[in-house]
Image (tube, helix red, strand yellow):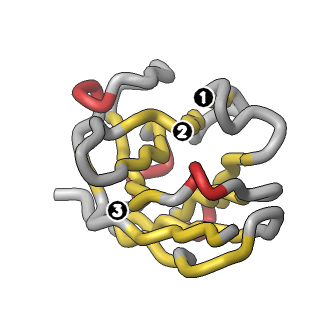
Amino acid sequence: QVQLVESGGGLVQAGGSLRLSCAASQRTFSTYVMGWFRQVPGKEREFVAGIRWSSVATNYADSVKGRFTISRDNAKNTVYLQMNSLKTEDTAVYYCAARKILILTPKQTDYDYWGQGTQVTVSS
């Protein structure tokens, strides 16, 4: 069983930055696809960004392109989401997810493991 633990959420003003981290519990995790999703109350969870561990291939939701960057540190079993130029509409609970099949996908149902989420609040 893979465990994912997110950290780094908090309160920030619009235009500011935050970096989220997601630490994974298993060494074999280095072969997984990792993704970040977010959810606001009353809405479906939406894809934010994804990355393959074994390459630099990434993909992003259109709403965050140019502002957010996903990266990984295989030695630390950790994936990051650097969020710049934050907007109030970025306010959500952010979730880290892992997928065993090595194909990038924005579909949440394609991911096998999930973290507990971390709250990001952007004030105006």
Residue receiving disc 2: 48
Where the C terminus falls, by quadrant? bottom right
Residue receiving disc 3: 26
Q: Which secondary structure lies at badge 2? A: strand
**Residue 79 in which image quadrant:** bottom right
Residues at marks 3 and 1, CA–CA distance in whole angstroms: 27 Å
Q: Which secondary structure lies at badge 3? A: loop
Q: Which of marks 2 and 3 is nearer the N terminus?
A: 3
Q: Earlier in the sequence, mark 2 or mark 1?
A: 2
- Asked if 80 appears above or below 7 in the picture, the reply is above
Q: Which of marks 3 and 1 is nearer the N terminus?
A: 3
Residue 65 visible here: yes
Query: Mark 2 touching mark 1, by CB under 8 A?
Result: yes
* Residue at (73% x, 74% y) in the render: 13
Residue 59 visible here: no
**Residue 63: % across, % down:** 65, 32
Instruction: Work out whether residue 80 or residue 8 is closer to the camera in this orientation and state it.
Output: 8
- Asked if 11 appears above or below 1 in the picture, the reply is below
Left or right: where does residue 103 sit relative to residue 113? right
Type of amino acid under label 3: Gln
Residue receiving disc 1: 61
**Residue 67: % across, % down:** 79, 45
Where the N terminus falls, by quadrant? bottom left
* Residue at (25% x, 58% y) in the render: 2
**Residue 16 in which image quadrant:** bottom right
